[in-house]
Image (cartoon, rainbow, N blue to C red):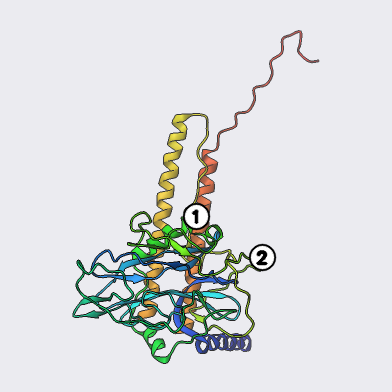
């Protein structure tokens, strides 16, 4: 028995060793897709809304039900003075594309070598810098009203190559690797996306027009002046960044277990770039969708109103459960970054998050089923037929 346990432990340690030597130090968000995202669309940057806002470039995110969708670039207030934004990116990891989540920190780390534009040319950031507690904007790459914002400068930024490729590794992907300095930045104190960014992503996910399958790689809302506001200060795409390729009808689909650190993109066997493969499970509360209830239809307006109120109350309670669990998991992610968790600790945390999320979903599904059963129109048994004495059967 002890021999079997020892062998299992050695195998587990070996797997972790592989991850630790072949991984970027940036934590992913638990999404893996067998097909790469579309090219980055071409668009203009909206004007900076106010002093202290930093640019966060747009990117293709992924949804279980609708595939890739565009998260518009937007201006966001930094969570604290001195922090800069390192964009997230998609990277090929031996068997699938993994998303490496962006983060705020004192330095801009590795973001896959992706040329997001507006100061993010693939390495570092040339769009501005912090000076004496204020952010100074480089107007060469940023759209800033200098009559209102005076802390600006103008320094020429030259891109070695202009490309709209949106992923690292894989067929046609950017061939870039993090420098030791960039890897060290990921290990410094930093925090994940702020609440405004999370809301921004949710708004994008709920907008059917932003799905790649609908806009063919040319989203009608490419950028916004402020996060979550998709009506004012909106900029549309000028053109798609490249030819849109829909996945073949027999495209392989699957979901990878989320490692603590995502595997390093490889130059070996690579799939062709297309648009989507759909994971089938939710590993985090942030990925959960609100449950939809069937409208009450008992035939009684008063009863339907009563049942609708019950549904609304349950929906609100379930939304609170989602939010509470999401905040708890995000806090643990930040602790993992601050305390520099090793690979084993990260994997244990992710397994725990997946289990928590699944338990909440099972609980909510049970609640919904029980409510629907209680609210179902009651079937009354038919009354037995009455017969006159002459008709009474023998």
Q: Nearer the viewer, residue 333 or 197?
A: 197
Instruction: Look at the numbered disc 2 and give the secondary structure of its residue.
Output: loop
Q: Which residue is mark 2?
A: 248
The quadrant of the rendering that contains the N terminus is bottom right
Label count reads 2
- Residue found at the far bottom of this picture: 180
Q: Quadrant of residue 197?
A: bottom left
- Residue found at the far right of this picture: 394
Vertical relation: 364 (above or below) 78: above
Vertical relation: 256 (above or below) 68: below
Q: Quadrant of residue 74?
A: bottom left
Q: Nearer the viewer, residue 153 or 192?
A: 153
Please rate how many residues cluster around mark 1, counting C-alpha atoms within 10 Å: few if below 14, some from 14 to 19, many from 20: few
Q: Which residue is mark 1?
A: 208
Residue pictured at 46% horizontal, 55% vertical = 207
Give percent across and percent down for residue 22. Answer: 53, 87
């Amino acid at each position: 028995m002890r021999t079997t346990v020892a062998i299992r432990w050695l195998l587990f340690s070996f797997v972790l060793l592989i991850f630790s030597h072949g991984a970027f130090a940036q934590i992913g968000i638990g999404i893996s897709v067998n097909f790469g995202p579309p090219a980055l669309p071409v668009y203009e940057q909206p004007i900076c809304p106010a002093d202290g806002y930093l640019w966060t470039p747009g990117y293709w995110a992924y949804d279980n039900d609708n595939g890739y969708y565009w998260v518009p670039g937007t201006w966001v207030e930094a969570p604290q003075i001195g922090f800069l934004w390192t964009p997230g990116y998609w990277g090929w990891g031996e068997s699938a594309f993994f998303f490496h989540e962006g983060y705020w920190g004192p330095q801009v780390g590795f973001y896959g070598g992706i040329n997001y534009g507006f100061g993010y040319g693939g390495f570092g950031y040339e769009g501005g810098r912090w000076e004496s507690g204020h952010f100074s904007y480089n107007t060469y790459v940023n759209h800033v009203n200098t009559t209102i914002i005076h802390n600006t400068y103008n320094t020429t930024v030259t891109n070695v190559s202009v490309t709209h490729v949106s992923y690292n590794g894989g067929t046609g992907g950017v061939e870039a690797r993090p420098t030791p300095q960039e890897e060290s930045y990921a290990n410094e104190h930093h925090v994940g996306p702020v609440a405004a960014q999370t809301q921004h992503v949710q708004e994008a996910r709920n907008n059917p027009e932003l799905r790649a399958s609908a806009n063919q790689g040319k989203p009608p809302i490419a950028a916004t002046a402020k996060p979550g506001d998709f009506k004012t200060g909106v900029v549309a795409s000028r053109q798609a960044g490249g030819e849109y390729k829909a996945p073949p009808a027999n495209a392989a689909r699957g979901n990878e277990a989320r490692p603590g650190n995502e595997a390093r993109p490889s130059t070996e066997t690579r799939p062709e770039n297309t648009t989507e493969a759909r994971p089938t499970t939710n590993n985090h509360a942030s990925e959960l969708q609100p449950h939809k209830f069937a409208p009450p239809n008992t035939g009684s307006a008063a009863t339907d109103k009563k049942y609708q109120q019950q549904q609304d109350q349950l929906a609100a309670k379930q939304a609170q459960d989602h939010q509470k669990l999401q905040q708890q998991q995000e806090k643990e992610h930040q602790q993992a970054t601050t305390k520099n968790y090793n690979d084993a600790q990260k994997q244990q945390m992710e397994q725990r998050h997946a289990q928590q999320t699944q338990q909440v979903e099972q609980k909510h599904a049970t609640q919904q089923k029980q409510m629907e059963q209680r609210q179902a129109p009651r079937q009354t048994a038919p009354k037995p037929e009455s017969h006159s004495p002459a008709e009474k059967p023998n």
